[in-house]
Image (cartoon, rainbow, N blue to C red):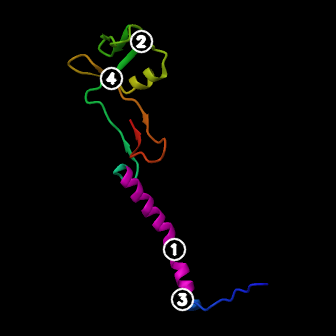
Amino acid sequence: MSSEVTATPSSYGQKGMFRVTRTLLTASPFMCLVLSGCVHYMRTGSFFPQDIKETLRNPVVVMECTPSGFRLQTGDVIPIPGFPNVPCDSPAITFTTQDGIEIDEQHNVYGLVHVCHNKCGNDPVRTHT
């Protein structure tokens, strides 16, 4: 018992089938890009991941870090609330103070840090500084 498969001519014909195949192969990468952008937009509200760069309004230059706080360019030492001894050898402290710090009216200290969001690929923000 052998079964034979017989080919039936397509309604497109040989030339028409080639056009359909070529069109599908040409449109497939474009459709993948469009659909991936749409899926990312539905999940995050943005078609592509964004880079956000924030700045300080009134940065003050930090001359050095001391265990009692940050010594500013003006000579003042600003203590850091919650840190009786500031870990000056910490790379996080060095990175945060390299662009300066901002001090508000209540003497709260602000610095810029780098936040990496790209953990799973669905995040609307790629980098946030």
Instruction: Please report contact status of discs 2 and 1: CB closer than 8 Å, yes or no.
Output: no
Q: Where does the C terminus fall, quadrant-wise?
A: top left
Q: Is residue 56 magenta?
A: no
Q: Nearer the viewer, mark 2 or mark 1?
A: 1
Above or below, 1 relative to 127: below
Q: Earlier in the sequence, mark 2 or mark 1?
A: 1
What residue is disc 2 on? Answer: 86
Amino acid type assigned to the residue bearing label 4 in the image: Ile
- For label 1, the crowd category at 10 Å Cα-Cα, with few meaning under 14, some 14 to 19 and many 20 or more, is few
Q: CA distance from mark 4 to mark 1?
A: 53 Å
- Percent across and percent down for residue 73 are 32, 16
Label 4 neighbourhood size at 10 Å, few (<14), some (14-19), many (20+)? many
Which residue is rendered at x = 33% and y = 51% of the image?
45
What is the secondary structure assignment of the residue under circle 4?
Answer: loop
Q: Which mark is residue 26?
A: 1
Using the rendered view, name the quadrant where residue 4 is placed. bottom right
User: Which is nearer the N-term, disc 4 or disc 1?
Assistant: 1
One can see residue 108 in this view: yes
User: For numbered disc 3, what is the local secondary structure?
Assistant: helix
Among the two numbered marks 3 and 4 on one chain, the one whose residue lies closer to the N terminus: 3
What residue type is disc 3 on?
A: Gly
Q: Which mark is residue 2?
A: none
Would you say the magenta stretch is mainly helix, strand or loop?
helix
Kind of element beneath mark 2: loop
Residue at horizontal 57 percent and vertical 90 percent from the top: 10
Q: Is residue 43 above or below residue 56?
A: below
- Look at the image and give the residue range highlighted in magenta: 17-43
Image coordinates for residue 116, horizontal then vertical, percent:
45, 37
The residue under label 4 is 101
Vertical arrangement, residue 112 with respect to residue 80, above or below: below
Q: CA distance from mark 4 to mark 2?
A: 15 Å
Does residue 2 sit above or below 31 in this rendering?
Answer: below
